Image: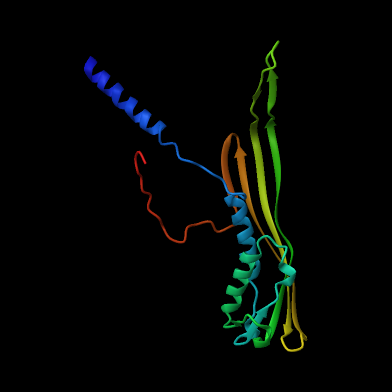
Amino acid sequence: MKCLFSAAFGFWGVILLLSGCTTPWVTNTSRSAIEQYLIASTVEHAIGNLDFSKYSGKKVFFDYDYFAPQVDKQYVQGILEMQVSKFDIIITRKTEEADIIIQPLCGVLGTDYSKFFIGTPQVPIPVPDTSVSFAVPEIPIFSKYTRIAYGRFAFNIFEAKDRKPLEVLAGVNSSASYNNWIVLLIPFSSHTMNMENSHDLDTKVDFFE
């Protein structure tokens, strides 16, 4: 019995040693995945509702001059060009080859957050006669941490030859939100985005890797 106990103790000791040596290296991107989801969902929802059917079969040149400072310019460009392609519009790289010019503008594309909290806040407690202190963490009875992305777009459409105005698509607004809740110490989340995988994935478990 004693030998069996020693063998079991040694086995779990080896397991702990191996697991302690295989801590994964974790890094974070400059913007969190949730923030990127919020921005992407806002862009996709705004542009995905645009109707370019009246220009079907025409050639278009995109004038992105007013989009230069936008951090997410390339993603907006890709989604916009994908949207016009759904209406059989041909994208050209030269104005002289185009029938129409689309000039996108972006007034707002960013995230904001708010927090509502009911409970006991974090309380620092100093240790007497020392410079050491510790803090009792906040204890939420109810809290709601909300992150929201807002987008506001407009699109000027001209004739390519003389830049005669054809149409203005103004006030194209969109938003997406993600909420972290804590109710009676139970955390959960809710959101207005499609965050499901495009197809089901199997979970593979690898030990000691």
| Observer able to see residue 120 | yes
| Observer able to see residue 172 | no
Image point (64%, 33%), residue name: 140
Q: Left of 22 or right of it: where is 68?
A: right
Q: Give the image location of residue 56, x and y in percent.
A: 61, 85
Front one among 99 and 169 = 99
Q: Give the image location of residue 10, x and y in percent.
A: 29, 23
Image point (61%, 39%), residue name: 182
Colour logic:
rainbow
Quadrant of the rendering where the N terminus is positioned: top left
Front one among 160 and 115 = 160
Image point (59%, 83%), residue name: 90
Image point (54%, 44%), residue name: 27
Q: Quadrant of residue 126?
A: top right
Task: Judge whether 159 appears above or below 129 on screen.
Answer: below
Q: Give the image location of residue 12, x and y in percent.
A: 32, 26
Q: Residue furthest top?
A: 129
Q: Quadrant of residue 151?
A: bottom right
Quadrant of the rendering where the C terminus is positioned: top left
Number of numbered callouts drawn: 0
Q: Give the image location of residue 105, x and y in percent.
A: 73, 69
Q: Left of 80 or right of it: where is 159?
A: right
Q: Quadrant of residue 107?
A: bottom right
